[in-house]
Image (tube, grey):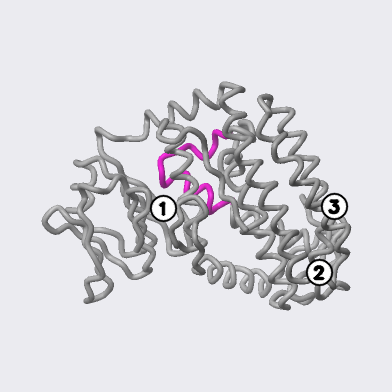
Amino acid sequence: MRKLLNTLFVTSEDAYLSLENENVVIHCGAERKGQYPLLILESIVCFSYKGASPALMGACAERGVSLCFLTPNGHYLARTCGWERGNVLLRRTQYRMADNAADSCRIARCCIFGKVYNSRWVIERTLRDHALRVDAPRLKAVSQRLANSLEDILQQTEPDRLRGLEGLTSAAYFGVFDELILNQKEAFHFEDRNRRPPVDRVNALLSFVYTLLSHDCASALEAVGLDAYVGFLHRDRPGRQSLALDLMEELRPAVADRFVLTLINTHAIRREHFKRHENNAVLLNDEGRKQVLTLWQARKREEITHPFLKEKLYWGLVPYVQALLLSRCLCGDLDQYPPFLWK
């Protein structure tokens, strides 16, 4: 359990929530784990199949406390909210800002700033830990190029110009991504980012993990009442969760790319976890997917200190905290959206 930004996160898989004297009480089996006054909460996010009592659900609806249910793995199930404090105003604000180029760019440039900042620190970590095993001058040059672009990104007021900068920095980053692969070089050589379909093992891993992260981001956005399909950087397209893609941009390097590099460099994923199809696509086989999913869930249970809140939380809660911060920005509680800046 953890309370962040007036939101109670219940992460125990066997937790059951009930109401007692205006308090939400968390039970795990016969043990009483804790209680929080409903008065201090704006929302409850529950990662448990056991759910909550009808009395608590009714009390949350009456008091305007949003109650969201997800599976222990983070798959969105359902959300309830009260009559007087639904999310219509938040979503109307989201739609208005998405239709305004200047407002869209103001949010989007924070997401891209976070992506480039985190990409640089993926490189810097490799330089710090393995300088003698990589082409250090080449990595330093790209790191400096990414650092130099950060101020330019924050100055952008046109979405198309921002997308162009994002494309250039992404190309520079992936241009040295192969240097970050330290082991199994014969099986996991990386030349460039390719997808639909991926044609090598590294891209197959990246695409699969990006899909997992995208789903987590979409669930987080729905949990706080935002529309995952209406984005600021990624524009509307039927069936595409554009805001989830916006949110995951800053998380790709720190959450997904580092995870993929760890899988390869620690030999957790090997050549035999992939298969090549007739159309030349390379994909994970059943054993490979199972291995990645198991380690992905383990990764989400590791703790970090959030760079903006300065509080400890699980990696798996990062998308939810960022979604909360985004909703606070849209509501005017924050001057600008604070991206997740990792070191």
**Residue found 23% across the figure and 50% down from its top:** 57
**Image quadrant in which you'd find residue 52:** bottom left
Q: In x, y percent, where is residue 148?
A: 76, 42
Q: From the viewer's perspective, is the residue at label 3 or at label 1 nearer? A: 3
Task: Say whether marks 2 and 3 touch (CB < 8 Å).
Answer: no
The residue wearing badge 3 is 141
The residue wearing badge 2 is 131
Q: What stretch is highlighted in magenta?
A: 214-231
Q: From the viewer's perspective, is the residue at label 1 or at label 2 nearer? A: 2
* Dot 3 amino acid type: Ala
Task: Say whether marks 1 and 2 touch (CB < 8 Å).
Answer: no
Badge 3 element: helix
> Gap between marks 2 and 3, in whole Å?
14 Å
Q: In x, y percent, where is residue 149?
A: 75, 40
Q: Which mark is residue 77?
A: 1
The residue most toward the left is 21
Q: Earlier in the sequence, mark 3 or mark 1?
A: 1
180 sits to left or right of 215: right
- Figure check: 86 above or below 183: above
Could you tell me what secondary structure mostly forms the magenta stretch?
helix
Badge 2 element: helix
